[in-house]
Image (cartoon, rainbow, N blue to C red):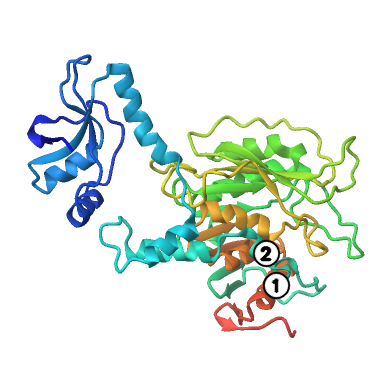
């Protein structure tokens, strides 16, 4: 293999890549150089011996005090040189791992030296492999206990449910959120707010969602999203389920609060829901985005229809954050095969909340956007599906619910799933046997 003196080589003059020189140096020390760097002779560029692939290997070798390095020489013009640099980096970005196979390979090694993986990385990988398939959420996850006419929970109560916390109160109130979070900040938000329709369920109990009136929806959402900014880390991923007829309202208020909407995800159900629309809905949207400066609000929106079988889910990000947000960034935990369509069965029964989401739907998004042990916020907890999803994914939830009756449902639902003992305002207080 041809070698060249490091003193003769020069890094590419416009390399956009920022590599981990320390990790590469550790690999070179342990394993030596196992592939050459690519060097352009420079006949057509006027820049002799410029590195096209392996710029950070060169930097690591120089850090280790090497005098020479293995090279493969090419002789291309500026256009080809630039394309080689870009594709060499981009091909790595687009690659994925078979996580289970990677774990097996790493476990087969006596130690991790020279792999670029440390013990913490290995444990994170082990957690992902142990709990990556959203279909592993069992039937009990969507089984919400029945409502009781006289709730145990009172406004202002704080429930500690294992690693999770629930406050009965108004999620637009900074004081309520301060009690919920203390000094913590959330890594993500997943929420299913009121849809802006005067909805009364068609069950025997004729369930009604509090704050679910069209006249107050704009202000409610704006206040809730503004309050949420204070407890979300910069650039935190955000998922907001909503009715398709109210997408303008949800997207506008989310932007007005400083969030940048990136995409609208679609939950495809296993059956349609009959409604008044010409075409019966069989999907629900989920909005996604990022956080640039807030746009002007557009208060206009279509008159709401009653909830049907379809709700979008907006996907986006809280204001701020550094580097790439979402896929390709350091806080994207899924693979590169995710699409905007999410296919999950509806809960077998949603008698406890008219728009109850399946836990498996939520965990599928957690697998992409929330690290194990991460903190997720839900300002409109409803029957508690976000909290239960966090339990199944070894994450932590901080949730707010206005209605004391539904707070009781959340507490008892968590008890049923975990067998744990809840604490109300610091004192143990089981509800399942009440």
Q: Is residue 83 above or below residue 132?
A: above
**In the rendered image, which quarter contains the N terminus?**
top left
In screen coordinates, is 325 left or right of 73? right
**Regarding mark 1 in the picture, which secondary structure is present there?**
helix
Res. 83 image quadrant: top left
Where residue 353 sits, quadrant-wise, is bottom right
Label disc, if present, on residue 413 of the rendered structure: 1
Residue 32 at x, y = what percent?
A: 19, 51
Identified at 69% across, 68% down, the residue is 138
Mark linked to residue 255: none
State whether residue 413 appears in this view: yes
Label 1, label 2: how many angstroms apart (C-alpha)? Answer: 8 Å
Q: Which mark is residue 384?
A: 2
Q: Is residue 381 visible?
A: no
Residue 16 position, x and y percent, is 31, 32
Q: Is residue 290 above or below residue 231?
A: above
Q: Residue at x 10, y 40 (%)?
A: 68
Q: In the drawing, does residue 147 fall left or right of residue 45?
A: right
Residue 175 sits above or below residue 9 on the image: below
Residue drawn at (74%, 45%) of the image:
284
Task: Decide if residue 235 is on the left or right side of residue 76.
Answer: right
Q: Are marks 1 and 2 in contact (CB under 8 Å)?
A: yes
């Amino acid at each position: 293999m041809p070698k060249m003196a490091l003193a003769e080589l020069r890094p590419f003059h416009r390399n956009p890549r920022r590599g981990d020189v320390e990790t590469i140096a550790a690999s070179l020390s342990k394993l030596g150089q196992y592939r050459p760097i690519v060097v352009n002779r420079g006949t057509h560029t006027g820049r002799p011996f410029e590195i096209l692939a392996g710029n950070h290997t060169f930097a690591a070798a120089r850090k280790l005090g090497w005098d020479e390095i293995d090279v493969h020489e090419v002789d291309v013009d500026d256009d080809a040189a630039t394309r080689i640099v870009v594709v060499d980096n981009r091909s790595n970005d687009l690659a994925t791992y078979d996580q289970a196979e990677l774990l097996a390979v790493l476990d087969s090694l006596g130690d991790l030296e020279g792999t670029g993986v440390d013990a913490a990385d290995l444990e994170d990988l082990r957690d992902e492999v142990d709990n990556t398939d959203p279909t592993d959420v069992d039937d009990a996850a969507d089984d919400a206990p029945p409502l009781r006419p006289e709730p145990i929970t009172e406004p202002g109560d704080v429930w500690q449910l294992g690693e999770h916390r629930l406050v009965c109160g108004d999620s637009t109130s900074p004081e309520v959120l301060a009690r919920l979070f203390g000094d913590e900040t959330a890594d993500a938000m997943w929420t299913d707010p009121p849809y802006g329709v005067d909805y009364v369920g068609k069950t025997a109990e004729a369930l009604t969602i509090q704050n679910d009136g069209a006249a107050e929806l704009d202000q409610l959402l704006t206040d809730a999203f503004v309050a949420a900014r204070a407890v979300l880390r910069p650039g935190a991923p955000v998922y907001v389920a909503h009715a398709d007829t109210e997408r303008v309202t949800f997207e506008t208020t989310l932007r007005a609060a400083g969030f940048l909407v990136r995409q609208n995800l679609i939950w495809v159900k296993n059956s349609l829901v009959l409604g008044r629309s010409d075409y019966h809905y069989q999907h629900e949207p989920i909005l996604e985005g990022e956080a640039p400066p807030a746009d002007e609000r557009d208060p206009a929106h279509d008159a709401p229809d009653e909830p049907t079988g379809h709700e979008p889910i907006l996907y986006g990000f809280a204001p701020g954050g550094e580097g790439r947000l979402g896929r390709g960034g350091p806080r994207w935990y899924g693979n590169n095969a995710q699409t905007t369509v999410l296919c999950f069965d509806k809960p077998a029964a949603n008698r406890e909340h008219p728009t109850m989401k399946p836990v498996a739907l939520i965990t599928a998004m957690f697998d992409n956007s929330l690290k194990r042990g991460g903190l997720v916020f839900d300002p409109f907890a409803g029957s508690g599906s976000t909290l239960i999803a966090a339990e199944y994914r070894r994450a932590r939830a901080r949730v707010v619910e206005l209605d004391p009756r539904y707070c009781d449902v959340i507490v008892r639902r968590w008890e049923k799933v975990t067998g744990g003992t809840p604490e109300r305002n610091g004192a143990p207080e089981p509800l399942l046997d009440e």
